[in-house]
Amino acid sequence: MSTSAYVQLVNLSKHFGKVRALDGLNLDIAQGELVALLGPSGCGKTTALRALAGLQDLDAGSILVDSKDITFVAPNKRNMGMVFQAYSLFPHMNARENVEYGLRMKAHRSSSSNRKKRAADLLELVGLSTHANHFPHQMSGGQQQRVALARALAIEPNVLLLDEPLSALDAKVRTQLREEIRRIQLEVGTTTLFVTHDQEEALGIADRVGVMRGGILEQIAAPAELYERPLTSFVAEFVGLTNPLPAKVSGGSAEVLGVQVPTVAGSITTGSGLALIRPEWFKVEASTSGNAKIFAVSFLGSTCRLTIDLADGARIRVQIPSAEASNLGIGSNVKVTLKSLPVFVKGV
Amino acid sequence: MSTSAYVQLVNLSKHFGKVRALDGLNLDIAQGELVALLGPSGCGKTTALRALAGLQDLDAGSILVDSKDITFVAPNKRNMGMVFQAYSLFPHMNARENVEYGLRMKAHRSSSSNRKKRAADLLELVGLSTHANHFPHQMSGGQQQRVALARALAIEPNVLLLDEPLSALDAKVRTQLREEIRRIQLEVGTTTLFVTHDQEEALGIADRVGVMRGGILEQIAAPAELYERPLTSFVAEFVGLTNPLPAKVSGGSAEVLGVQVPTVAGSITTGSGLALIRPEWFKVEASTSGNAKIFAVSFLGSTCRLTIDLADGARIRVQIPSAEASNLGIGSNVKVTLKSLPVFVKGV
Amino acid sequence: MKLGIPSRIFKVFIIGITTLYLAGPLYGMIDFSTKPLGNEGGRSLRAWKAIGEQEDLMSSISVSFAIAIIVMLLLFLLVVPTVIWVHLRLPKLRRPLELICLLPLAIPGIVIVVGIAPLYRWISIHITESPISLAGVYAMLILPFTYRSLSAALALVDISTLAEAARTLGASTMRTIFGIVMPTIRSGIMSGVVISLALVLGEFTISSLLSYDTLQVVIYLLGREDGKIAVAVSLAALLFVFGILFAIPTTKRQRAILDADIA
Amino acid sequence: MKLGIPSRIFKVFIIGITTLYLAGPLYGMIDFSTKPLGNEGGRSLRAWKAIGEQEDLMSSISVSFAIAIIVMLLLFLLVVPTVIWVHLRLPKLRRPLELICLLPLAIPGIVIVVGIAPLYRWISIHITESPISLAGVYAMLILPFTYRSLSAALALVDISTLAEAARTLGASTMRTIFGIVMPTIRSGIMSGVVISLALVLGEFTISSLLSYDTLQVVIYLLGREDGKIAVAVSLAALLFVFGILFAIPTTKRQRAILDADIA
């Protein structure tokens, strides 16, 4: 445990019946850092967040914030700001009253005018100053989550806890609000734990991403490192798309599609395996004598996603810059090779 | 009107009170083609699709399928397969019975064993052969929409109509099912109209994308053309992200960020305007004397999204390959210029 | 979430109260109806055996069932189509209709009798003296319950999308209504039927005040002569309604729909 | 979606039937209560003015209101906490509890009387002869209605998330329950209160059979002596309940909540 960590989760354990939601989880978060916990449902990520909020009791382990042990402190004494997956605004209060609620609950009450000022500032911060008098049912889902964020930040929380705050929103709003949350978090500087099952969301927002499975952290690293150098096949396959292709490994390099590429740590070191190849690590050239055929082309803006049937019948998904895709249509014969990037190879 | 078009919507008009949902819409779809109609809510895209299904009567205009005028044919005689936005499986029937329903309604009833065979084939096609006896409430949203797709295809429809079939699903399932729909549509070869408000979805799935506004088509083109050569500022801004930057236009080229770039058709031809720049059209280099500063970095896998504050206070969103972003962190000073690609410039 | 209430004590308390309230009367009835007269000693089923011998009782049972059947018909012909129609075509009328349908709940039975008595005097003079004419008032009394259960069932599913889906698949209007819409809200219709049946078979105030001999009125009169038979009949009627209440969702399919309702 | 029914005719038909059913009795009552006796000629408000002079009536009104208030107390102290508690902590018990709470609907009033009469004999001998003891039975009778409206209000919002949100924002358990949970389901509580009030003030069968002089019983007895006064009182009681029904959501905030319910 680094002593400089602001939040420390030490050896947290929690069993629900036979299910081990947390199985000795350790996690440190530095002050001002945004850490995302990523994992499939049931991996324990939400249990960890709720434990930090005090809404989930633990079988074992301890929680330290700013070097103080808060393991047995009641949730209403922890000063954590939380945004929930479900819309959680109080329906009988308007936006301003919702934001003020936490301030009114404080032992040393601030004056009414101070509370109003702070609520106005926060609604401004989340871009909803014109909606102060709207009731929750008069706002869209995205607006409600903005107010919930303002409400959580109003109490100047020690830690901001975000429990899949975007999962109920539709795609466009989700991306916008994700960028907003990151902007606000950077401006305010609050230490933040963000829980999600969406890898794109986790990679896009966090300083570090922790991938959880079975109640423990499988790997925690900066987004790019996690994506390019996964330590396990679970991380490689859960974070981003991969195409499994047969590979022969020897001496720290692998032969895939006839190309020699280096392998990353965690790969098998010898013998046959499956190389997990990211869609953008392929090279595709139009070639009438090519070993593969394009099944579908999907335009994504700057890049194109190609679905390609290889000669051996495998169907792979490839992503290339749109500029290189202009002469590739459905049914084109192509030659597929690999860029010389390190790959993860798992045993079979 | 090209005579080879399989589906022809000719001059469709429909007013709801004062709202012009369709205002003389013309649209041709070739046999086997997948056309996506894209637009904000209220642009008339759903009205057009429902008119083709026969669920929406028209004020004027005619609808031809395979050169036959079906404008006044009842919806149950049109042989259109439709998948709805809301889950629309019949709750008292299991998956197989749902898929068989359309066959049972046909005038020339197929035999019970033929129906069973066809239902089994279609459930196989959508990857749910093991769920034939499940009732809708026992299936996930994504599974329900797959069954709905199988049900729509079971009747061998003249046209497959998809009315935002993915909008109720969560992000991961949505992308998967989008690719599935395209795969199945290519395999079966059914002429398809796909309505959506999600530009990523439309660009990713369609042969051609039509952008609608105010009841007419603003532009219809292949995805890459729509993205790279929008004809109006509405299309440029609705399809994909754009950063508006001040530009000086003269003689078919514009000066933006000190770089001369060509302009596309539809741009203003002279004077000052706003160039609409795609995030991936910027070039970014680390430079201590740079004119801009990185505010946030968002890792998207093969690419990185940078939020950059320019010297003049404008905040732009830039997308660059992850490899080029490795030495760029929050707070870095950078120099931002443009690639020499044609841009759209709108008046101010 | 922790409410901080000592759960176990509260739980025992609640279950105790509920049991007392609901099981108490049932136990009282069984006890009373099998208790011996005077000092005879020993339990007896005399009262239960005597049920079949009461002619008034038998005829009132058939009258009450006839009324129940007519009320069911009115329910299917008038209430169900109206609610479906308002739901599909006039969504703005939903709230007013709900308020109107709740009114019979708010109007005391006595008030209804006073208001409707002249009409019934006219009916019994000019049309029929049969208690079956009560079906008219009862059809109004069941509105609050049937409307609610139908409207709840309709709110659970997007019925207009289902109807449109059936249309595009080639179903005619009639096949859509009978093959798709009605089966989809079957659980709502059934729960409306059960509650209505219970109300019609159990109604006393109005039939008594309008002087019609329905089941409950005869039970009441019988109770003055021989309380034990009255209690036995009441208990039998009660068990009958319970039987219907729990027996209706029998097929696997119907249970699937009910489960969907709960989820 | 097109049902293909000639809508306009159907609409007129439905509205006609509804009006007849609901306005008919009301009109009958107004007409009858202001009609002159015999051949006096001209309308008169005699019956209405005479209400205040009936002592039995006045005492029965206060008795019925006392019962209503006790029932409300039982509702707030027993039913509301139970439903909230089951909803938050024992979601698996929701369906059984709903069935149990529906039972009083299925049990005819007469049956309840027979089952509960020995208890009331004991109460009137050993505790009190006051009709106020009826509050016990009535609290059971209102269960089907109050349970439903509370449970519907709770189902509309994710009450446990709201409670957790309040906790993380620093609210104590009590402040969470009284400041967040109760106001959130206020519309459900209110609609339960209104329906209960209507039922308690309108109940006749049980109080009459147990020989307690509640408002409806006195109205009935009065009706034998002077029908017009009885009708006037009925109408007044009815209008009173209507008044409550429509007056309750008065503040802007409450209307906001009611609107949210509909949406």
Image (cartoon, coloured by chain):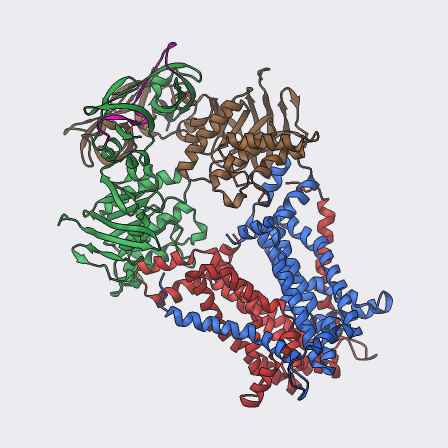
Chain colours: A brown, B green, C red, D blue
Examine the rendering and report whether any part of residue D144 can be seen.
no
Please identify the quarter of the rendering in which residue A121 is found: top right
Say which quadrant the C terminus of chain B sits in.
top left
Instruction: Tell whether position A258 is magenta.
Output: no
Q: Percent x, y for residue D135?
A: 75, 63
Q: Percent x, y for residue D102?
A: 62, 62
Please identify the quarter of the rendering in which residue A23 is found: top right
Magenta-colored span: B267-292
> Image height check: is C77 above or below B141?
below
Q: Residue at x 56, y 19 (%)?
A: A31
Answer with left or right where residue D38 lies relative to residue C260: right
- In this rendered view, identify the residue nearer to me: C21 or C27: C21
Q: Percent x, y for residue C28?
A: 74, 69
- In this rendered view, identify the residue nearer to me: B22 or B333: B22
> Image height check: is A348 above or below C91?
above
Q: Percent x, y for residue D77?
A: 72, 53
- In this rendered view, identify the residue nearer to me: B241 or B65: B241
Answer with left or right where residue B3 lies relative to residue A227: left
Answer with left or right where residue B164 lies relative to residue A297: right
Q: Residue at x 70, y 81 (%)?
A: D227
Q: Specify the farthest residue to the right.
A: D126
> Image height check: is B191 above or below C50?
above
Instruction: Tell whether position B274 is magenta.
Output: yes
